[in-house]
Image (cartoon, grey):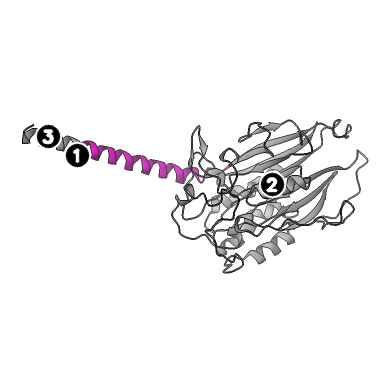
């Protein structure tokens, strides 16, 4: 092969490499641009859990329902006016109960904006737990590092937080808790509670963030006849029928140890966030990680725990019964409405809130 041929081959290889690099850069820019757009494309998922009245000993309860709005991982910054307005409009769905499962803030100055967003829910019964980003501001880090971090796959807390999670708390978590309690919402950080909503009696249990090892599952209050804290004054049952009961658990991060404890405690329904649904997903493949010890198929959606083999409900739809047996609970893991300000993209994983309707049929 002569020098002329070698030079031509070298030029061709250089051009091919340049084209490949250019295509890769263009694809990266396109994906990032779309990810920025998608991270603001908020969706309200509507899911129903059907409970057959006759099999539950409630033959006269058909048609009664309890509507729950589930918000999580808002990661609010004061400038995010569109997100604030979108959250406010959720109150138009006429919810009976509000659930907040943590990571509400991304900066201390966003607390007034958060309370503004939640103002339309004030006076509606609700409950809340905290995540790490209700205590600690997000830190600059490699936005893709979590894709390769398997340190929490065994259920251990993440190593990317201070050794002492009580140290350096720079977010106004105490003021936020007080404001939420003033709004009528039960603080379930390692606590229990009970609310009465019409003919529904809702028993509650929650834990502080398992992701930073703050969870201490609360002991039972001396058995069935205890008197947990009450968020709203209980009212007398209506003459239209008997009181309906449901037990709900709240956790920020859905670690298996917490879900197992809540099932053992008798929860019918558990709400969680934290995973962001994987945040960066692959179409037809789904989430690459859950940022906890759940398998990827449970990164978001409504599913039974322990797993029964049934398909995860990841969009809108209904499931046939509140509990198939006394050894499982329904778990709703929401993708959340925000991201860290240092990784503000979502791909194939829209930010969401979830409306869950418990319906007696």
Mark closest to the chain's N terminus, 3 or 1: 3
Q: Which mark is residue 61?
A: none
In percent of width and height, residue 335 lies at 58, 44
Name the residue at 79% across, 55% down. Answer: 193
Mark closest to the chain's N terminus, 3 or 2: 3
Residue to which mark 2 is pinned: 259
Determine the CA span between mark 3 and mark 1.
Answer: 10 Å
Select label 2 or label 1 by which is in front.
2
Determine the CA span between mark 2 and mark 1.
Answer: 55 Å
Residue 273 sits inside the magenta stretch? no
Name the residue at 49% across, 44% down. Answer: 346
Q: Is residue 25 left or right of residue 297?
A: left
Residue 27 sits inside the magenta stretch? yes
Secondary element at tag 3: helix
Q: Which one is nearer the viewer's eye here, 223 or 169?
A: 223
Q: Which range is magenta?
A: 16-43
Residue to which mark 3 is pinned: 8
Q: Which one is nearer the viewer's eye here, 124 or 327?
A: 327
Tell me where residue 164 sits by quadrant. Answer: bottom right
């Amino acid at each position: 092969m002569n020098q002329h041929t070698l030079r031509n081959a070298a030029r061709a290889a250089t051009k091919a490499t340049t084209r490949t690099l250019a295509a890769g850069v263009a694809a990266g820019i396109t994906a990032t641009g779309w990810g920025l757009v998608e991270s603001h494309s908020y969706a309200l998922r509507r899911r129903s859990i059907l409970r057959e009245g006759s099999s539950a000993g409630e033959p006269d309860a058909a048609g009664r329902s309890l509507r729950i709005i589930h918000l999580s991982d808002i990661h609010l910054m004061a400038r995010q006016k569109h997100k604030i307005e979108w959250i406010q409009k959720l109150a138009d769905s006429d919810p009976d109960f509000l659930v907040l499962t943590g990571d509400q803030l991304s900066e201390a100055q966003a607390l007034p904006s958060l309370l503004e967003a939640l103002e339309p829910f004030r006076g509606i019964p609700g409950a809340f737990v905290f995540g790490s980003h209700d205590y600690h501001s997000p830190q600059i880090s490699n936005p893709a590092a979590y894709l390769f971090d398997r340190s929490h796959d065994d259920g251990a807390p993440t190593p990317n937080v201070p050794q002492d999670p009580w140290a350096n708390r720079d977010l106004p978590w105490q003021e936020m808790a007080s404001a939420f309690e003033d709004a009528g919402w039960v603080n379930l950080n390692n606590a229990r509670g009970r609310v009465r909503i019409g003919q529904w009696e809702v028993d509650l249990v929650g834990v502080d963030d398992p992701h930073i090892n703050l969870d201490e599952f609360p002991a039972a209050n001396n058995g069935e006849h205890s008197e947990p804290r009450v968020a709203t004054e209980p009212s007398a049952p209506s003459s239209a029928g008997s009181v309906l009961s449901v037990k709900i658990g709240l956790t920020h991060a859905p670690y298996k140890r917490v879900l197992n404890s809540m099932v053992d405690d008798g929860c019918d329904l558990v709400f969680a966030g934290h995973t962001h649904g994987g945040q960066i997903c692959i179409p037809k493949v789904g989430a690459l990680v859950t940022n906890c010890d759940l398998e990827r198929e449970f990164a978001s959606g409504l599913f039974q725990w322990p797993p029964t083999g049934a398909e995860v409900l990841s969009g809108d739809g209904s499931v046939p019964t509140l509990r198939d047996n006394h050894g499982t609970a329904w778990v709703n893991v929401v993708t959340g409405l925000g991201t860290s300000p240092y990784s503000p993209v979502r791909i194939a994983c829209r930010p969401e809130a979830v409306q869950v309707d418990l319906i007696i049929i």
